[in-house]
Image (cartoon, grey):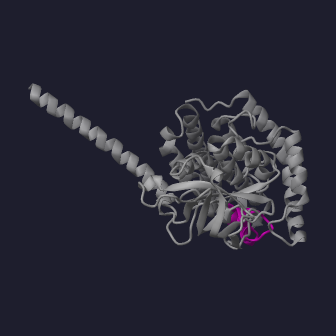
Amino acid sequence: MNFELSDRCRDFQERLTAFMEERIYPAETVYEQQLAEAGDPHAQPPVMEELKEEARSRGLWNLFHPDPSYGPGLANAEYAPLAEIMGRSHIASEACNCSAPDTGNMEVLTLFGTDEQKERWLRPLLDGEIRSAFAMTEPDVASSDATNVEMRIERDGDEYVLNGRKWWTSGAMRERCRIFIAMGKTNPEGPPHRQQSMILVPRDTPGVTVVRNLPVFGYTDAEGHAEVLFEDARVPVANLIANEGDGFLISQARLGPGRIHHCMRAIGAAERALELMCRRAAARVTFGQPVATRSNVQDWIAESRIEIEMARLLTMKTAWLMDTVGNKHARTEIAAIKVAAPQVALKVIDRAIQVHGGGGVSDDFPLASMYAHMRTLRLADGPDEVHKMTIARRELRRHATEERDESKELAEQTSRG
C-alpha cells in the first residue's frame, strides 16, 4: 500500500495552494458581497468568472476527471489531496470546475453517455459554460433505499413521459443550470434493482417546475437544493442514459467517486477549522492567560489533529484501493470514509466554534456555515446508517464464510479419522 504522492500530484498541490492563497481566500468576502448586491442567492458573482479564467490559465481545471481527454487524468489517490485543498473554501471547487453535482454528472456522461449526449451536454459542462442538477431523492419515500424511487418514466412512441416529485435536487437553482439527470422507474414490475432508469431532462422542458429551494439550517446554497415537479414532462427517447433498467447501476458508479470527493473536501474543511481554532485560541485572553494555555482547549487541538490524520489515512487507503482493485472491491472502505470524514469534520468544527465563543455561531467567521453543510453531508449520497449497514453486512458475510470453511474442514478431518 503506497500513499506517496506522485510528482505531478505534488506539482498540482503547489500550484493549487498558491491559487488558494493568492486568489481564492481574498475573493471569499468579495463573492459574498456580490451575491448580496445581486439580490439573488443563486446568481453568478462576477468574481467567480474571474476565478474560473484564472484557474484555467493556471491549468487547474477539471482536476477531478480521470479521463485525460477531459482533464489531467489524475488517479483517485492523486486527486484526493487536491480535493482536500479545495475543500478549505466554499468557492474553490466551482472555480476549478470541480464542484458537485456537476462532477458526478460529467462522470456519468463520460461513462454512459452517447456521442450525441456528450456533445450536447458534457462538452459545455467541461467548459464551464453551463451547470447541471441531479434529481434522485423524493419527498414521499425513504430515498436512502433507491429502489423506493417512485417517479415514473414511461415510453410513449419516440418520447419518454416523466411524472413525479423530487427534492434536494442539487444544482437546480443556479441560473446557469440547463440540464437535469433524473432517476425514475421504467419497469415497476421488474427485479428491484432493474426497475430504475436515468434520463436527461433539459431544465426548460414543459412540465418541469422548480417549486422552491430548500435551505440548509437556514443557509441558502448558491447551487440550491430544489423541490422539482415533473408533470407529463416529455423528452426524446435519445435522452435515456444507457439502457432501461440501468439506473441503479449508474447511480452506484456515480456515487463511488463522488463520496471520496466529498470526504476529502470534508477533511480540508476540518483542517481550516483547526487552523482557525489555533489562531483564535492563541489570540484571545481569558482570566489573564491566552485561551491556548487551557488544558481542555489543548485537548481539543490534539484530538482534532489525531482524528484528521486518521480520517485522511483511511481516505487515502480507499483512493488507493479504487485505483488498484476498483470501486467494487473498495465498497467497505468507501462506506467507511463516508461515515468517518464528515463526523470528524463536525467534531473539529464544533470545537473551533466553541473556542470562537459567540463569534463562532455568527457569519463573521465561516464556521457556522461549515458546520451546517458538514452536518448535511451525513445525509448526502446516502445517510450514515446505510453505509454502516453495508459495512456490517459484508463483515457478517465474511465471518459466516470463515465459519462454514472451518466446519467443512472439521467434517473432512472427522471423516478421515
In this view of the protein, can residue 287 be seen by the observer? no
Seen from this angle, which residue lies furthest front?
Answer: 157
Above/below status of 417 relative to 259: above
Q: Toward the viewer: 300 or 289?
A: 300
User: Is 108 rendered above or below residue 192?
Assistant: above
Q: Position of residue 330 (x, y in %)?
A: 51, 40
The quarter holding residue 183 reads bottom right
Magenta span contains residue 362: yes
| Residue pictured at 40% horizontal, 51% vertical | 392
Q: How many numbered dots are placed on residues in this image?
A: 0
Q: Nearer the viewer, residue 42 or 362?
A: 42
Image vertical order of residue 400 relative to residue 378, above or below: above
Magenta segment: 352-370
What residue is at 78 percent from the left and 32 percent from the top? 11
Image location of residue 72, percent across then percent down: 75, 34
At a point 45% along the width and 53% down the height, the residue shown is: 193
Is residue 134 or residue 75 the one in the foreground? 134
Magenta segment, principal secondary structure? helix
In the depicted structure, whether residue 354 falls above or below residue 127: below
Tell me the quarter of the image containing the C terminus.
top left
